[in-house]
């Protein structure tokens, strides 16, 4: 059994940008109200002809190419999403078909905003156990399709997008590039973030989520660092689920990552649910804000109320 590492990352966002001023013409809100409460300025919105699997496939193709691979090298595809409207074929199978992969195993993972970090841990476990050699892990959501555009407390949050990572085995004797996962849930708070109904609509108990995230998550994040043999001060970057800037900033401070770059992609992308962590990570890599081998804490939290985090080494 060998550890695994992230070989490459990639991301994709739709071309259409929805500004706070645009939203002010749709619901009773304003740019100042949105920025003061959630820190978001813009978000990308997919059109009717841009389904979740298309967003996912664009991000996945970029990650595979960045890893120097062709699609036939991937033997497992994991797509984290909670906005797949159809039950079958799943998004992973559709992504595999779009990318021309011959025979990968394909699974969707629905853990909402913590979906990517759950999927990344699943990929790590599959590689360690010898069940897969190279895994394409994607977080993708089209939150605009489940948004209630009459509710100013939630519609101002959402955006659409996808991020992806190629996971492969480390060289024998090499240090693992994906640390142990710390994951769990708070079942009695499972209804605090939900996508329910016909048609499905996103809703949440914002204050409950804020209090839980800012008080309960810091010790969990520190434990994830400890499991990787690090302290928060050792981290080069922290990439939290991009839920709300007013959650991200105090949470990062309470973790104690004093030397880390803090991902704030939510400002320009909104809350893209399972897409938010890989999207923000890919942008940090693309901009050169973190370097190869740097330790980075990924921590997802949200729907169910589930959480999952691990320290990875920057590809």
Image (tube, helix red, strand yellow):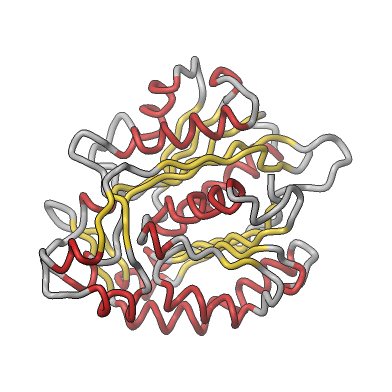
Q: In this view, does 179 lie above or below 35?
A: above
Q: In this view, does 110 lie above or below 219?
A: above
Please identify the quadrant where the C terminus is shown.
Answer: top right
Q: Which residue is drawn at 50% across and 62% down?
A: 300
Is 193 left, or right, of 241 in this rendering?
Answer: left
Please identify the quadrant where the N terminus is shown.
Answer: top right
Residue nearer the viewer, 258 or 60: 258
Q: Name the outermost residue toward the right.
A: 173
Q: Which residue is drawn at 50% across and 27% down?
A: 105
Q: Residue at x 65, y 51 (%)?
A: 288
Residue 159 sits in which quadrant?
bottom left
Q: Residue at x 42, y 84 (%)?
A: 211
Residue 183 position within the rendered picture, expressed as x and y whole percent measured from the top left: 56, 62
Residue 272 position within the rendered picture, expressed as x and y whole percent measured from the top left: 37, 55
Is 41 left, or right, of 30 in this rendering?
Answer: right
Residue 12 position within the rendered picture, expressed as x and y whole percent measured from the top left: 42, 41
Is 224 left, or right, of 107 in this rendering?
Answer: right
Q: How many labels does the image show?
A: 0
Residue nearer the viewer, 72 or 104: 72
């Amino acid at each position: 059994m060998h550890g695994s590492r992230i070989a490459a990352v990639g991301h994709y966002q739709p071309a259409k940008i929805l500004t706070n001023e645009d939203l002010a013409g749709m619901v009773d809100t304003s740019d100042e109200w949105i920025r003061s409460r959630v820190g978001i300025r813009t978000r990308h919105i997919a059109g009717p002809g841009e389904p979740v699997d298309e967003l996912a496939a664009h991000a996945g193709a970029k990650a595979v190419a960045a890893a120097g691979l062709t699609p036939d090298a991937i033997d497992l595809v994991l797509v984290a999403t909670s906005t797949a409207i159809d039950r079958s074929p799943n998004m992973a199978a559709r992504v595999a078909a779009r990318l021309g992969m011959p025979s990968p195993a394909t699974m969707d993972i629905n853990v909402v905003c913590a979906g990517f970090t759950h999927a990344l841990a699943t990929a790590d476990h599959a590689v360690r156990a010898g069940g897969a050699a190279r895994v394409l892990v994607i977080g993708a959501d089209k939150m605009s399709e489940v948004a209630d555009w009459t509710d100013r407390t939630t519609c101002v949050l959402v955006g659409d997008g996808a991020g992806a990572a190629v996971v492969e085995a480390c060289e024998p004797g090499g240090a693992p590039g994906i640390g142990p996962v710390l994951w769990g849930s708070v079942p009695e708070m499972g209804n605090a973030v939900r996508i329910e109904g016909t048609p499905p609509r996103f809703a949440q108990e914002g204050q409950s989520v804020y209090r839980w995230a800012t008080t309960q998550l810091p010790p969990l994040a520190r434990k994830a660092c400890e499991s990787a043999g690090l302290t928060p001060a050792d981290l080069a970057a922290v990439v939290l689920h991009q839920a709300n800037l007013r959650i991200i900033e105090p949470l990062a401070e309470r973790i104690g990552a004093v030397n880390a770059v803090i991902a704030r992609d939510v400002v320009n992308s909104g809350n893209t649910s399972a897409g938010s962590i890989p999207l923000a990570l890919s942008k940090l890599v693309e901009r050169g804000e973190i370097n190869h081998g740097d330790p980075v804490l990924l921590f997802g939290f949200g729907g169910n109320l589930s959480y999952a985090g691990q320290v990875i080494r920057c590809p």
